[in-house]
Amino acid sequence: MTTVLLFIFLLFPSAPPVKQEVEMSSRRRDLPDTSLALLNTTLRRASDVRYFRETDGNSRSYEVKFRLDGARWSVEFSADGELEDVEIERSLSDLQQATVAAIRSSLNQRFSRYNIRKVQAQYLSWPPDLGSPTAYELIVEGSNPNEIGLFEVNFDPFGAIQSERRVLEIPDL
Amino acid sequence: MRISCMVLFFLIALPLSAQNDIKRIWEPSITYTHRLNDLWSVTSQLAAFQSPDLLERVEGSVMGLRRISPRTSLGVGYLNRQITPLEDDTGVEHRFILQYGYQIPWGIHLISHRVRAEERIRESGNVHRFRYRISMRTPLQGERLDPGERYLLLQDEVLGSFSENPFTADNRISAHLGFLLKNRQRIEIGIQHRAERLFTDSDVVNVALLSTVWHFTN
């Protein structure tokens, strides 16, 4: 039996490469000065402030995460300190009813069953115009008869799906 | 929370290093998970159980898993264990396994529950055993686990052999440091404390186990 199992091990090919995106904790002083200057006033009112450095093999960016007014904020900057986007975690009930209805309709068409794990409203300017997000990013547990997984689904401000990608899942042994 | 996890890691490790009457084991293993599609996967494993002066056992197993939902799975498996394979007095055990798994995210942590029912077929007789394991995996860099990052895995498993007379149970608590490599292979180095033969008249057997796991997937 052991010999058979060893044969099975050798039979299977090695794993293909995947997108290499690494988020590492960073220090405040490592961030570009322009990014800190932009957030300076806001961070005085924020709590649980954390700094991250993210690389995906080709590019590097910085992210500042904090809590403000009960919500989780994430502000991303390029390596030279230019604002890339602002993401604020929301619950569906914070969104306009028409948008929620459109998002649910889109998800109902995409999945036979789904569960929304996380909702983030995205903004491209600072300070963000909280009433006018440019997009929504949802983390969704979704399933169809032949498909089960965790998905990052991006919606436009009106609730139509713009893009999606699989989220890497690492099962326990 | 990450600091709490690290403290727990050392709380498990330090008492193990201090005890003299404890049995010490190294358990190297290699596993391969072949994903057939989103729903089905097969995991095979080879493992050894090495004490300082004896190769106590070598085992191979195959487990077929069916994902029922994004959080739940069912599995059926078979394990073959060769007992003291390098000695004159060897033995063999066949084991059939049924498994239910449930995962739930908790902030940056992933909490996993696993329930197993096993039938162990040995020369000395058959034993039915039930196991429950809870584990928590925490990324050590950033808020999610990405390729190239480290993670901490804390586990506790209780095992009860109901068809043994008298009833006996084990508890296994462990902490593992894992590395998710960029090709999605994983390496885990862990320490485990096993308290065996609980609820019996005989003394509890304490085992300190160092586990090294190399896991790869397609």
Image (cartoon, rainbow, N blue to C red):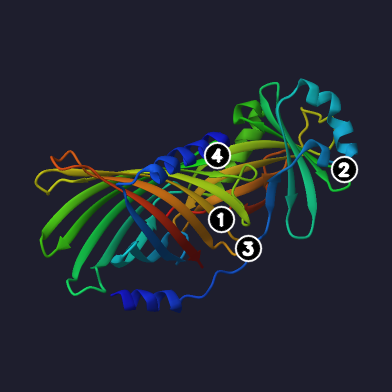
Amino acid bearing label 4:
Ile
Q: Which residue is mark 2?
A: A81
The answer to whether residue A26 is left or right of residue B180 is: right
Gap in Å between the C-alphas at discs 1 and 4?
Answer: 29 Å
Chain under disc 2: A
| Residue in view at x 10 percent, y 61 percent | B124
**Can you tell which quarter of the image residue A94 is in?**
top right
Q: Is residue B75 above or below residue A96?
A: below
- The label shown at residue B179 is 1
Q: Position of residue A31 (x, y in %)?
A: 83, 41
* Marks 2 & 3 on one chain: yes
Q: Position of residue B18 (x, y in %)?
A: 40, 42
Is the residue A27 above or below the residue B211 in the image? above
Label 2 vs 3, first from the N-terminus: 3
The residue closer to the viewer here, B154 or A15, is: B154
Number of the front mark, 4 or 2:
2
**Tag count in the figure?**
4
Observer-side mark, 3 or 4, equals 3
